Image (tube, rainbow, N blue to C red):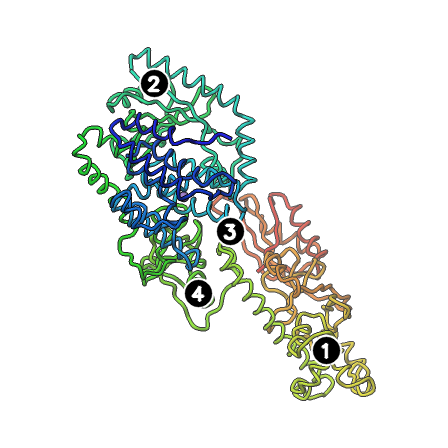
Amino acid sequence: MFMIRIEDVISKVEKNRPESNIELIRRAYLFSALHHKGQKRASGEPYLVHPLEVADILAEMRLDETSVSTGLLHDVVEDTLVDLETIREYFGDEITRLVDGLTKIAHISNLSKEKQQAENVRKMVLAMTTDVRVVLIKLADRLHNMRTMQFLKPEKRTRISQETLDIYAPIAHRLGMGKLRGELEDLSFKNLYPQDYKKISHEVEARRPELEAALEKITNTIREHLSENDVPFVEIQGRVKRLFSLWKKLKKRKLSIEQVYDLIAARIITQNDKKYCYLTLSVIHDVWTPVPERFKDWIAIPRDNLYQSLHTSVIGDNGQSFEVQIRTEEMHQIAEEGVAAHWKYKESKLGKREEDKSLDELRKTVEKLLLPLVENTSENQDSEEFIESLKLDLYPKDVYAFTPMGKIIQLPRGATLIDFAYAIHSEVGDNCTGAKINSRIVPLRNELQNGDVIEILTTPNSKPSRDWLNYATTSRARNRIRHWIAEQQRADSIEMGRKLLEKEADKFRLSPKKLLNNENEMKRIANEYGLGRAEDLLASIGYGKTLPRNILGKFLGAEKFAELDPDKRKETRLQTATKAVKKFIGLGEDAILVKGIDNLLTARARCCNPLRGEEIVGYISLGKGVVVHNKRCKNVQQLMINKDRVVEVEWAKSEKEEIQSVRILATTENRTGMLAGITNAIAEIKTGIRDASARVSKENRGIIEVTVEVFDKKHLDRVVGSIEQVPGVIAVERVNS
Ligand code: MN
């Protein structure tokens, strides 16, 4: 296996910073080698490989001898018997301070994961603002650990990758270190979502020849046109998007890879004068049509993290768009290396003596970038809150809203006020009656926006509503609402069961109280049905699974039951009491014809007013008994969620024909005599008309409304049929109410 040597690191430093103190680096190397002697990494390699690789990354970043030496020594205090005083003796104050800063970031134990993260970030940020080299070394350390992760246990891999994605990649981004951030993100992605990673990299690989051919064509075209127009350039790059950012885009927009057009992008690096960037841009816009909203001038207005570049998207020859970035060499270096590059440039312009001053300037820049993250925080602050507020700054993907007391609530994008209420506390959610966003009352279905200050209005006895499920997005809120609905339905069923049992007891001339208050007896009967408590038995009656009559049978015993049975006592009366609508409750083993108990338990649903002969369905509802709906009624679709309460019903035969009023609406051409024509047609089939009216609609149609008296659906169909025969009639429909 290839193993890095200290000479490789030294030659990089000598090349990048010829005046460096190489002797210091050699001493740091020997010290590290001596103290890590015998230690091994998870891969089985000597431990020394790790500090050497970290030092190499730092040398690659063109950092100074102090940083490279600290890279070699960064784990000595943490992992060997060496203490800080010994480091100070051998290497002086500056390196000691850096090693101390790094050790402190690594060494926080006995804290919860979240607390540990919060503390880590806080310490890192504070350390960075005094000396940015601490974070650069820490990032190099993390990068090497991420690169060699395959030897760790899966659990540890996941934890470290998540932390990298949550904390280190965003900090690298904040510091403008685009290259390092990209690598950290891709490595975390690979470890956290191995299957997605595999899939997406296969897909990209499969398309690579095609993509490279397209890139080749694009870069050639750019080269030709720039030369033709005498616009100088340093380099033209073509690249395929990074896997992590590609994956995020696919997920966010729910696209497949075939649907992503800008898989590829071109980058033009110009000489160090921004005028070349704008000249290049004009050539690009001359060759291809730009997409108007996609042009960004980060040169005129640099990003916070010092990034400068022109971005434009253009429509390629095949009709697919791609991005072109244009920047100077210096801007490019800053885009890739962030503050590290900034440092180098500052220093190269100044003499060695001025180095302190340039470091100072850099420190100010870093402070400006990072200090807002930890401002107004303290050691004692709630770690969770701190992490939340940190994420607020680092991540724009979630929504952050505030309580009136200033507490941050983090929710996924698309979350509504209901989600917010439940995120505060489940009781706040349950009792929520309304909400104010930034002091304005708004409907609960409103989506949250970043920075909203939200006050949830509650009333102590207020309860959740089923339709909240239509706009609650978090699982916490949804589970809680569902739980409440289930509880409510159970309470309703118990109440319903109690009423049914009382009525049945009445018919047996029994005191309902005598039965219901006899707890032992009720429990015994419940047990016979395999149920635990009396309440369960009542609920079972309420759901229509158990018949109250059977309960009385078990309560009274066979002999007494037969004696008191009203069916036997008054057979004839009962038959006449059986009303037009018979109900079959066809659930469970007790599927038995239930005669209309005092006719109290059926009602025609007002919403659809079912007509004899139409398909119907019953729904047990509290206080109303079985409400009978037309099967096609819209409300029924919603009721169907609660299958336990749906009962089969059917129209019973009836000796006497029952008359029902139904309203019919006919749309006709706008001509005279339509109303008369229609009423005649109805009268001809010997049907009563209760009411009729006519008007003209905005669309210049005749609208005729008739209320007719019909026996059943067949009868209604005949009426509708005869109206349809009247010349000039366009459409006929039944209206419900
Ligand atoms: Mn390390």
Q: Which badge, 1 or 3, comes first in the chain's sequence?
A: 1
The amino acid at mark 1 is Asn
Please name the amino acid that badge 3 sits on: Arg
**Of discs 1 and 3, which sits in the foreground?**
1
Q: Work out whether residue 194 can be spotted.
A: yes
Mark 1 and mark 3 residues within 8 Å of each other at the beta carbon:
no
Residue at image mark 1? 527
Q: Foreground residue, 100 or 153?
A: 100
Label 2 beta carbon less than 8 Å to ligand 1 = no
Q: Earlier in the sequence, mark 3 or mark 4?
A: 4
> Do callouts 3 and 2 mark residues in contact (Cβ within 8 Å)?
no
Neighbor class of circle 4 (other Cα within 10 Å; few <14, some 14-19, many 20+) is few
Q: Secondary structure at mark 4?
A: loop
Sequence order check: which comes first, mark 1 or mark 4?
A: 4
The image quadrant of residue 664 is bottom right
Is 203 placed above or below 422 here? above
**Along the line of sight, the residue nearer the viewer: 301 or 496:** 301
On whether ligand 1 comes within 8 Å of the CB at mark 1, the answer is: no
Foreground: disc 3 or disc 2: 2
Tell me whether the residue at label 1 lies in contact with that at label 4, contact meaning CB atoms closer than 8 angstroms: no
Q: Nearer the viewer, mark 2 or mark 4?
A: 4
Residue denoted by label 2: 286
Whole-percent x, y for residue 351 in the image: 17, 30
Mark 3 vs mark 4, CA separation in Å: 55 Å
Q: Secondary structure at mark 2?
A: helix
445 with respect to 531 (left or right): left
How far apart are the alpha carbons under marks 3 and 2? Answer: 63 Å
Which percent across, then down, holds residue 23? 29, 33
Q: CA distance from mark 2 to mark 4?
A: 58 Å
The reply to whether residue 370 is in sight is no
Picture quarter with the C terminus:
bottom right
Q: Which residue is mark 3?
A: 695
